[in-house]
Image (cartoon, grey):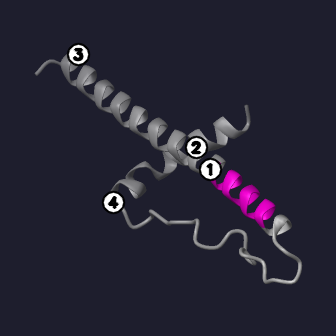
Amino acid sequence: MSMNQNYDDQAMIALEEQQVSELVASLINYAQGLETQVVGLRSQINRLSASDTAKPYPDLHSDIYELFCDYPAYERNKTNIEAFLENFQNR
């Protein structure tokens, strides 16, 4: 294998890894937007509920989070995902 071929293979692997990281980061960003919508809807439901009954969502943020840090791909992409999210949020 020539030096150029090795470099091309490494560049392709790096590009694929970056694309996967960008996809995952975009999905995370989308999920954060959905989270904001869910919390807003729950808040609205609480406001519209009868005042003499318990609020349907006393904790607006309950049971809408899931952690994915136990996935092997998470650790492999953690740095790229966090960097992408930070860059995306600073736009």
Give the residue at x 81% y 71%: 49
Query: Which of the image's four quarters has the N terminus?
Result: top left
Gap in angstroms between the C-alphas marked 1 and 4: 25 Å
For residue 52, above or below residue 13 = below
Secondary structure that dominates the magenta span: helix
Gap in angstroms between the C-alphas marked 3 and 4: 31 Å
Q: Which mark is residue 4?
A: 3
Q: Which residue is mark 1?
A: 34
The reply to whether the C-beta atoms of the residues labelled 1 and 2 are less than 8 Å apart is: yes
Badge 3 marks a residue whose secondary structure is helix
Q: Which mark is residue 72?
A: 4
Gap in angstroms between the C-alphas marked 3 and 2: 39 Å
* Quadrant of the image occupied by residue 70: bottom left
Mark 1 or mark 4: whose residue is earlier in sequence: 1
Mark 3 or mark 1: whose residue is earlier in sequence: 3
Q: In this image, 75 relative to 6: left or right? A: right
- Name the front one of labels 3 and 1: 1
Give the residue at x 65% y 36%: 88
